[in-house]
Amino acid sequence: MSIGVLEPYRRRGIAAQLLDAAIHWAQTQDALTWLDSEIFGHNEPALQLHRRFGFAEVGRVTDMYRIDGTPVDDIRLTLRLRSS
């Protein structure tokens, strides 16, 4: 699943509501223990949002992508939903 908010609607709490809904849904799924996320390294607002929800960085792939010729890192985060 991907979450994205169009530019004119950003900074209104929409992404936080979507992420919160995704987390709550995942917590109702008995088979899920972790919720993982991948974020472009330059997307500081998304990184801060995920950290606020308790996601922890577990990996980083440097120069994973090129956007308009600019190297972009891929940051991997995870949120533990429950023990084992």
Image (spheres, helix red, strand yellow):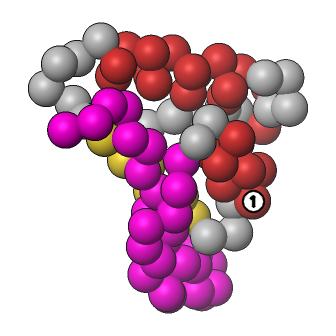
Q: Quadrant of residue 35?
A: top left
Q: What's under tag 1, amino acid-wise? A: Glu
Report the side of 23 relative to 6 (left or right): left
Q: Nearer the viewer, residue 73 or 57?
A: 57
Confirm whether the magenta stretch covers residue 67: yes
- The residue at 42%/73% (across/down) is 59
Dot 1: within a 10 Å radius of its alpha carbon, few (fewer than 14), some, or many (20 or more) residues?
few
Give 73 or 26, whichever is nearer the viewer.
26
Residue 72 within the segment the image draws in magenta: yes
Residue lying at the far left of the rendered structure: 31
Whether residue 46 sits left or right of residue 18 in the image: it is: right
Give the position of the N terminus as an image quadrant. Answer: top left
Identify the main secondary structure in magenta. strand
Quadrant location of the C terminus?
A: top left
Q: Position of residue 7 (x, y in %)?
A: 78, 37
Mark 1: secondary structure: helix
Q: Which residues are magenta?
A: 55-84
Query: Disc 1 designates what residue?
Result: 44
Q: State whether residue 3 is above or below residue 13.
A: below
Q: Is residue 47 above or below residue 59?
A: above
Is 72 situated left or right of 16 in this image?
left
Q: Residue at x 35, y 19 (%)?
A: 27
Q: Is residue 27 visible?
A: yes
Please provide percent x and percent y for residue 61: 43, 81
Picture residue at 66% right of the left edge, 54% below the top: 47
Residue 34 lies in quadrant: top left
